[in-house]
Image (spheres, rainbow, N blue to C red):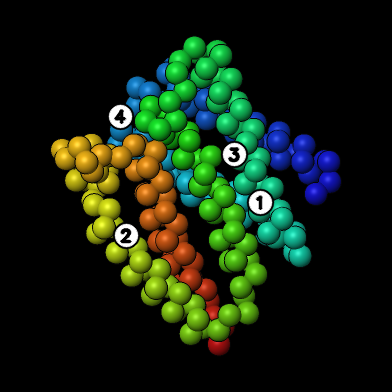
Amino acid sequence: MSLVDHLRLLIFVTVAWIAFVIIGLPNYYQDWPFRKLLYFCVFVYFLVGFFILMMTKKYEGYFLRRALWVAFYITVPLMIYDIIYVDLIRHEPFDLLNRFWYLSVFYIVPWIQAPLIYFFLVSGSLRKRNWIILSMISLVLAVILYNFWGTFEGGFFDYMSSYPERNITMLDSALRLSILGTVISVAVLSMYRFIKLLVRW
């Protein structure tokens, strides 16, 4: 990428981070009800994936490199901004495992989304049968993960389990939900590709 592309990406994510901070005022989402914050994170999850796709798809031949650069700018600069804002400006402990789980999960998720989006962009030559197989495998995996990790009503994947040996951090819980969402996204996108090829045929 050119220097202009790097600056454009940095400016864009900086503006997005400022908007994120404004939405979370006055306590940077600490006073939001848990369920509301969770739904907001699900929305941001898909928004981040859409942003990576839009910033990548026009760079044919450089899809993976571009996707990884976008993931870098979504994570590294924003983590630095968060540290400055929370630790130096607000003078609060920057607890990434529990208190600020909704920040730390998005330092990781874009690095999962970027390779998948790259695969989606370069996989147009796959046959219909391969897409339906991938979709079915993803759906089965989603069901297995959901049943293995628990249900939302059961305590958001056991982060508040009544059994201490099963307790995990809220970051672990959020990452589990992100992985589940990613698997479901792969299933949906695979089915979309299959239907698109079927209609074209």
Task: Determine the CA span between mark 2 and mark 1.
Answer: 27 Å
- To which residue does mark 1 refer? 68
Q: Position of residue 64 (x, y in %)?
A: 68, 59
Q: Is residue 56 above or below residue 20?
A: below
**Position of residue 108 in the picture relative to residue 143 (left or right):** right
Q: Amino acid at mark 2?
A: Leu
Callout 2–callout 1 Cβ contact below 8 Å: no
The image quarter containing residue 155 is top left
> Helix or strand or loop: what does disc 4 sit on?
loop
Q: Residues within 10 Å of mark 1 (few under 14, many from 20)?
A: many
Give the mark toward the camera: 4 or 3: 3
- To which residue does mark 4 refer? 33
> Helix or strand or loop: what does disc 1 sit on?
helix
Query: Looking at the image, is mark 4 or mark 3 earlier in the sequence?
Result: 4
- Residue 75 badge: 3
Q: Position of residue 60 (x, y in %)?
A: 75, 64
Give the mark toward the camera: 4 or 2: 2
Query: Looking at the image, is mark 3 or mark 1 earlier in the sequence?
Result: 1
Give the mark toward the camera: 1 or 4: 1
Callout 4–callout 2 Cβ contact below 8 Å: no
Q: Count of labels shown?
A: 4
Query: Looking at the image, is mark 1 or mark 4 earlier in the sequence?
Result: 4
Query: Looking at the image, is mark 4 or mark 2 earlier in the sequence?
Result: 4
Q: Amino acid at mark 4?
A: Pro
Q: Residues within 10 Å of mark 2 (few under 14, many from 20)?
A: some
